């Protein structure tokens, strides 16, 4: 049941963030992902170290992935892109709950998940106007996300697990 609640919470955080970015309220957009992370810190005290480490790792890896896509000229943000760091951090936290399967399965599962989930997430963001992708950018996003999620799942495997 925890995984279902977590999945709903992570989706709510994504929607909150993206819709407030779209409304040009970037400062308020961060509240959704940050609240999602804060709830995990409060409710799951035994997981605080893992939550903090995975949020930091995901924010860093996501920043690298998105920066590479921007530098390659395939990804553009019409608004302030800081919200992406918060979304990546929230995704990292989900590796302790609803996305836990990514650390419990072989590495190729994480790579495949990233290659599929990245384009889906960015397609949603593009349709809502918070990012723009060049026509050939989808392949680059799939590759970047495959590497990023693969790396995050590797980090998640070595991060100390909390007490459930």
Image: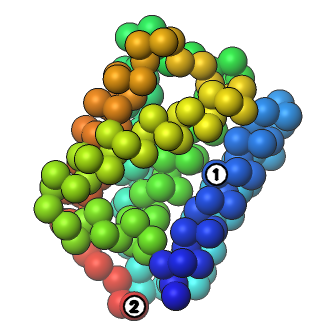
- Helix, strand or loop at label 1? It is helix
- Who's the residue at 70% across and 42% down the image? 18
Q: How is the image coloured?
A: rainbow
Q: According to the image, label 1 marks what residue?
A: 14
- Could you say where residue 121 lies in the image, as x and y percent from the top left? 53, 41
- Quarter the C terminus occupies: bottom left
Query: Residue 93 bears which disc, if any?
Result: none
Compare residues 1 and 46 and report the one nearer the observer.
1
Res 142 seen here = yes
Give above or below for 44 relative to 92: below
* Image quadrant assignment for residue 7: bottom right
Q: Is the residue marked by circle 2 packed among few (<14), some (14-19), or many (20+) residues within 10 Å? A: few
Res 61 seen here = no
- Could you say where residue 2 lies in the image, as x and y percent from the top left? 51, 84
Q: Total marks drawn?
A: 2
- Could you say where residue 99 lies in the image, as x and y percent from the top left? 40, 66
In the displayed structure image, the side of residue 75 where residue 10 appears, left or right: right
- Who's the residue at 22% across and 56% down the image? 109
Q: Give the Cα distance between marks 2 and 1.
A: 25 Å
Q: Is the residue marked by circle 1 packed among few (<14), some (14-19), or many (20+) residues within 10 Å? A: many
In the displayed structure image, the side of residue 8 where residue 44 appears, left or right: left
* Image quadrant assignment for residue 49: bottom left
Q: According to the image, label 2 marks what residue?
A: 164
Looking at the image, which residue sits at the far top? 73
- Could you say where residue 59 lies in the image, as x and y percent from the top left? 44, 45
- Who's the residue at 59% across and 62% down the image? 10
Give above or below for 93 relative to 146: below
- Helix, strand or loop at label 2? It is loop
Q: Earlier in the sequence, mark 2 or mark 1?
A: 1
- Who's the residue at 38% across and 60% down the image? 54
Q: Nearer the viewer, mark 2 or mark 1?
A: 1
Assess whether mark 1 and mark 2 are in contact (beta carbons under 8 angstroms).
no
């Amino acid at each position: 049941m925890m995984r279902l609640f977590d999945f709903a919470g992570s989706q709510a955080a994504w929607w909150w963030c993206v819709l407030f970015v779209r409304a040009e309220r970037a400062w308020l957009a961060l509240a959704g992902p940050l609240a999602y992370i804060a709830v995990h810190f409060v409710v799951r005290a035994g997981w605080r170290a893992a939550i903090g480490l995975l949020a930091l790792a995901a924010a860093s890896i996501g920043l690298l992935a998105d920066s590479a896509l921007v530098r390659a000229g395939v990804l553009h943000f019409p608004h302030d892109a800081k919200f992406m760091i918060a979304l990546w951090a929230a995704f990292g936290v989900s590796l302790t709950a609803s996305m836990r399967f990514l650390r419990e399965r072989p590495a190729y599962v994480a790579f495949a998940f990233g290659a599929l989930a990245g384009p889906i997430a960015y397609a949603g963001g593009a349709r809502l106007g918070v990012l723009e992708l060049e026509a050939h950018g989808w392949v680059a996003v799939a590759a970047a996300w495959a590497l990023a999620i693969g790396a995050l799942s590797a980090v998640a495997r070595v991060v100390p697990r909390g007490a459930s």
